[in-house]
Amino acid sequence: MIYKSSNYTDVSKAKNDLKHLLSKDCIFEIKEISTKRTVLQNRSLHLFFTWCTTALKDTGAEFEYKVFETVFTCPYTDTIVKEHLFKPILKMMFDVDSTSKATKKEISESVDVMILALNKRGLNMKFPNLEDLKAKNEK
């Protein structure tokens, strides 16, 4: 059963269920379930992908991929940054294939790794904050 600690009714039910389990000779597990990304984090993440795309394009970098022994190049896009730069980091670090399934912590740590990698290549990147999102919405 899943209970939300901020909901009084859920807390009451959880206490009753725990009492019941403690009265039995059984094995049980209690664990915290991490919340998934927030709407604000999702908006920031996509703005971050846009910033990365712009920074990569500004350096003249192009995305290269190989199909049947032929190498193709194209300008970076937000989708390429998300699918070929960010998601592989998320997959390697946490075995998570989708940003919608990642926790807030997993996204945050994956972004940190990506920022570090881009900064090592001369791109001075940061993750958008609330002011950055407000500025974007005002445009």
Image (spheres, helix red, strand yellow):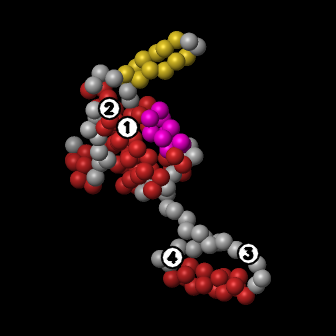
In depth, the one of 69 and 14 nearer the eye is 69
Q: Marks 1 and 4, how far apart in space?
A: 38 Å
Numbered marks: total? 4
Q: Position of residue 65 (x, y in %)?
A: 49, 21
Q: Marks 4 and 2, how far apart in space?
A: 44 Å
Q: Quadrant of residue 56?
A: top left
Q: Are marks 3 and 4 in contact (CB under 8 Å)?
A: no
Q: Marks 3 and 4, how far apart in space?
A: 22 Å
- Give amino acid for label 3: Ile
SS at badge 2? loop
Quickly name the residue at label 3.
27
Looking at the image, is mark 2 or mark 3 earlier in the sequence? 3
Q: Marks 2 and 3, how far apart in space?
A: 51 Å
Quickly name the residue at label 2.
121
Query: In the image, which residues are magenta?
Result: 83-92
- Answer whether residue 109 is magenta in the image: no
